[in-house]
């Protein structure tokens, strides 16, 4: 009887041990599955964040590349006008240099005083008319300078005689200059087939206020 009880007890112990192993295995499986799901979710999130960061980096790189393309435009825009501290020396040097590049040495290049510059800013005045006659506009206003800029004048006195091709080359250089330069009050007469006489003229320039 004692031996039978012992065998039965052993069977119960074995069955209980097997059940515990099965339960433990199932629990371990579900635990491992949960951890794997969490790991997969974390990996997916990291991958998504990495892709988003890569996209942001690519966008920044593209933006930087786009901005760099317009660096020359910005430089040209800055060169259109000159700083007030560089006027008139910088402009005079530029005009003198352009003349020498065209083979012309000007007799004088100087800035026009603001008191002498009123005619160009106010416009072209018309002579007084009889009060009985129809009134005509007294001035012809010129386009206003861009905001933050002031128009100034440089007076240029050329040699008495110039080669036509040289003076034409100088005008082309002025027109294509990075700095805004506009020749005004230009008057010349033809001497022969190749030479001309040019009267003193003025060049407009924009100065930053």
Image (spheres, rainbow, N blue to C red):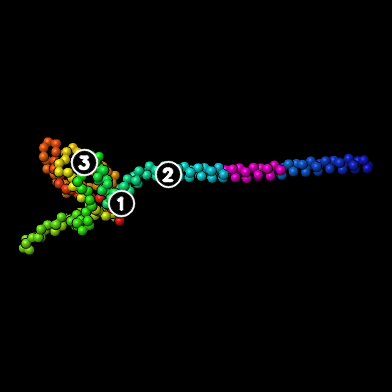
Decide which of tag 3 and tag 2 comes sooner along the chain: 2
How far is the residue under mark 3 from the one under mark 1? 24 Å
Element marked by disc 2: helix
Please tell me whether residue 38 belongs to the stretch shown in magenta: yes
The secondary structure making up most of the magenta span is: helix
Query: Residue 99 or 125: which is nearer the viewer?
Result: 99
* Whole-percent x, y for residue 209 in the image: 30, 56
Element marked by disc 1: loop
Front of the two marks 3 and 1: 3
Q: Which residue is mark 1?
A: 86
Numbered badge on residue 104: 3
The residue under the point 25% across, 39% down is: 101
- The stretch in magenta equals 28-44
The residue under the point 11% across, 40% down is: 190
The residue under the point 66% across, 42% down is: 33
Q: Which residue is mark 2?
A: 64
How far is the residue under mark 3 from the one under mark 2? 44 Å
Decide which of tag 3 and tag 1 comes sooner along the chain: 1
């Amino acid at each position: 009887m004692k031996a039978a009880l012992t065998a039965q007890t052993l069977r119960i112990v074995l069955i209980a041990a097997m059940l515990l192993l099965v339960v433990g295995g199932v629990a371990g499986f579900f635990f491992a599955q949960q951890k794997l799901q969490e790991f997969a979710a974390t990996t997916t999130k990291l991958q998504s964040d990495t892709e988003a960061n890569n996209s942001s980096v690519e966008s920044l790189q593209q933006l930087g590349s786009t901005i760099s393309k317009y660096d020359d435009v910005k430089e040209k825009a800055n060169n259109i006008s000159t700083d007030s501290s560089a006027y008139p020396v910088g402009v005079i040097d530029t005009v003198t240099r352009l003349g020498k590049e065209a083979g012309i040495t000007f007799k004088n290049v100087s800035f026009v005083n603001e008191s002498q510059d009123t005619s160009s800013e106010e416009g072209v005045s018309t002579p007084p008319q009889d009060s009985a006659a129809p009134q005509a506009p007294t001035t012809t206003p010129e386009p206003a300078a861009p905001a933050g800029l002031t128009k100034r004048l440089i007076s240029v006195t050329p040699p008495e005689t110039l080669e036509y091709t040289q003076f034409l080359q100088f005008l082309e250089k002025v027109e294509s200059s990075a700095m805004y330069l506009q020749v005004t009050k230009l008057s010349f007469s033809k001497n022969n087939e190749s030479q001309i006489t040019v009267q003193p003229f003025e060049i407009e320039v924009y100065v930053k206020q």
